[in-house]
Image (cartoon, rainbow, N blue to C red):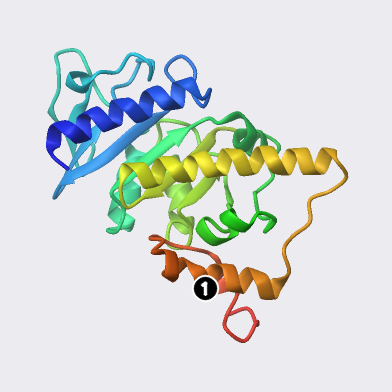
Amino acid sequence: MRYQEIREQVCDICYKMWQLGWVAANDGNVTVRVAENLYLATPTGMSKAFITPEKLLLVDGTGAVVEAMEGLRPSSEIKMHMRCYADRPDIGAVVHAHPPGATGFAVAHKPMDMYNMIEDVAVIGSVPLTPYATPSTTEVPERIAPYLQEHDVVLLENHGALALGADLITAFYRMESLELWAKITINAVILGGSHDISRDNIQKLIDLRSYYGVTGKHPGYKKYSADGEGV
């Protein structure tokens, strides 16, 4: 994609996040890799509904501003985003939001470690709950780091959710899938219980990732080996 198209796509995704109720006020942030050691980032202190292409900042791999409109600066959570890129060279975009269903799990201190939805078993796998960290500090990247090599989606304890993707649309879709999955699971529990898919069928779904060209990491590659034994 051309640089201006990426800027417009970021704004479109931000507006969709706001429309869907994943963010309120100044919540959430989005970054996209646009070149070696260069990233577009949403500004801090601004509703995702009001962001326009010229308001996006260009930052380097440390989060330092390379180019920005006067008075704008990146979110203090930029450290979390940069850790994702540093640890995962395959990642091209990071989305952070507070979708109510998934964030409910984070506030209840419950990981989304169920294997109950076909699509989510194949695309996301289990979603861990990362330990509590004070926003804007180096605690946040340090807390998520142990999970980045096996997961493209994590819950942030008492905070929200983080989704990674090879590109922005993929990261957005993962956040969207996470939220729908959370809502379905909550409904299932209300109706009497959430039931996992059998172990054999979980492996079959994981094996379909290559057929559908799904990129990224999956915890099932480690949890479920070909012979059915954990590795």
* Residue appearing at x 27%, y 26% in the figure: 74
Q: Quadrant of the C terminus?
A: bottom right
Q: How many marks?
A: 1
Q: Is residue 189 left or right of residue 201?
A: right
The residue most toward the front is 211
**Is residue 193 in view?**
yes
Residue type, label 1 = Asp
**Is residue 138 in view?**
no
Tell me where residue 202 sits by quadrant.
bottom right
* Residue appearing at x 30%, y 44% in the figure: 82
Q: Is residue 59 above or below residue 16?
A: below
Q: Is residue 70 left or right of residue 191?
A: left
Residue at the spot of label 1: 207
* Residue appearing at x 53%, y 64% in the figure: 219
Q: Is residue 195 left or right of residue 142?
A: right
Near-viewer residue (110 or 3): 3
Q: Quadrant of the N terminus?
A: top left
- Residue 50 image offset from top left, x and y in percent: 33, 13
Q: Is residue 192 above or below residue 15?
A: below
- Residue 77 image offset from top left, x and y in percent: 37, 33
- Residue 90 image offset from top left, x and y in percent: 29, 58
Tell me where residue 141 sits by quadrant.
top left
Q: Is residue 191 above or below residue 69?
A: below
- Residue 38 image offset from top left, x and y in percent: 16, 42
* Residue appearing at x 35%, y 49% in the figure: 84
The residue most toward the right is 192
Near-viewer residue (24 or 71): 24
Q: Is residue 196 above or below residue 5?
A: below
SS at circle 1 = helix
Q: Residues within 10 Å of mark 1 (few under 14, many from 20)?
A: some
